[in-house]
Amino acid sequence: MYANRLLVIGGVAAGLSAASRARRIDPRLEITVLEQGPDVSYGACGLPYLVGGQVRSAEQLFVYSPDFFRQHRNIEVLTGTRAVEIEPGRRRVRALHAETGKEQSFPYDRLVIATGARPQWPQIPGIDLAGVFQANNLEGARSLLAFIEGRLAGSGGSRAARAAILGGGYIGLEYAEALRRRGLEVTVFHDREEVLEGFDAEITELVEGELARHAVTLLKQNPAQAISGDGAVRQIVSAGGRCDTDLVLVAAGVVPCADLAASAGLALGPAGSIGVDDRLQTSLPGVFAAGDCAHSLHLVTGRPVYLPLGTTANKQGRVAGENAAGGNARFPGIVGTAAVRIFDLECARTGLSESEAHAAGFRFVTAIVEHPNRPHYFGGTNIRVKLLAERNTGRLLGGQMAGADGVAKRIDIVATALHARMSAPQLAALDLSYAPPFAPVWDPVLIAAQALERRLREQ
């Protein structure tokens, strides 16, 4: 029997990648996408730059509209439609319309769950006060921007407006830069000793220096305990005391939106994410999951891991969509490659950090070097590179870098080496490009690999 109805829950990266790929595989499919929010197909990673003013308008972040999908891809995208229950026995999804509250049932032959992730919301007094924002989606970023441009801009100008950010991860620090660009005083409350989870101390110390250089106050091991105010935010209360503020931005990480899947009886994986195989098939036949709600296989450890990244979401969506349309695509896994810019400092990582390598049971050695990204006569500045390799085999386990520029793309060299399961000597022998505007004769990656090779010989 021909399975002609594909239903997708989620209309951002993974969901629309799945729908689009399914359409290419099978032009006959009836494809419907349910999105609970008002917006689809936008670049969520650009939101801090919208708030910071580097992206001029929210419209620039949009890729396609629901009308585009309807007219050009024959995909029905329904916004403001929240899925509330998956009924696997009946092969249907119950949903509610956001404005009317009307319930509707959507039958399916194949289902792709791409419900994404939601912000971790601290359970502290005052978290529901006016002036508390989360900016992981376009609605939240717009609200934050309107607040800054409206209420705070009209406060009289006697002092700079003050912002408190709860969380010192990627999103929190990107927003720290965005709010400083808007002229706000910024304090970051972080519950750990090191910012940017997944980076080692040799890199995070450079990040802390960059934050201080741009007058961002970082309070480590000092999570917010309460937010106080008379109906609106006035102070943050923490173990370190009280801090006056005009707004609070919650950036304390995300958790997978897997409630629908769990209620339907689907097996879960790390961090409560939806469990999938390499075809993105869940534990229920005909039901797939992709993106920030699902886990991935880490290619270095060989174990399931929850690492929500936009690149992964788009790739997983493509695989899930192809298989939901009758194909047989595979998602091999990830090495956790990520990059972030904090003011004038680029940071990037791939593979395992020291703590992750320890947790995975590896015996390893490390090497750290600083080397110019270009010749000195062409304005070269140092990049700090840290590499890890397995002690007995020399197999590369991970890498991290920080510097003024040239970091974000150099990490891709190390990521490629991890995919190929290369050793430190093999990385050191790579034929990398050289020209004064781009790199020195000996690239920082090669210098770090040579240092790692020497450390391995010393063991």
Image (cartoon, helix red, strand yellow):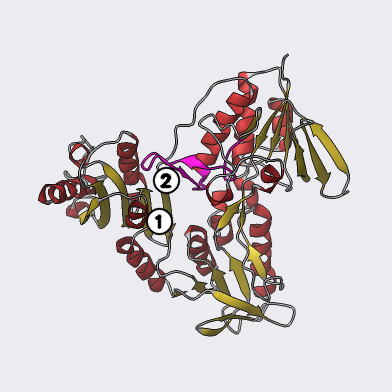
Q: How many marks?
A: 2
In the picture of the structure, the residue carrying the numbered disc 2 is 336
In the picture of the structure, the residue carrying the numbered disc 1 is 198
Residue 276 drawn at (x, y percent): 56, 36
- Viewer-nearest residue: 52 or 7: 7
In this view, 232 is above or below 356: below
Tag 2 secondary structure: loop
Earlier-in-chain disc, 1 versus 2: 1
Residue 31 drawn at (x, y percent): 72, 27
For the N terminus, the image quarter is top right
- Viewer-nearest residue: 347 or 379: 347
- Viewer-nearest residue: 183 or 126: 126
Residue 426 drawn at (x, y percent): 20, 36
Observer able to see residue 162: no
Q: Quadrant of residue 254?
A: bottom right
- Cβ–Cβ under 8 Å for marks 1 and 2: yes
Amino acid type for the residue under numbered disc 2 = Gly
- Viewer-nearest residue: 119 or 71: 119
Q: Quadrant of residue 420?
A: top left
Residue 288 drawn at (x, y percent): 62, 33
Residue extent of the magenta highlight: 289-310
Amino acid type for the residue under numbered disc 1 = Gly
Observer able to see residue 252: yes
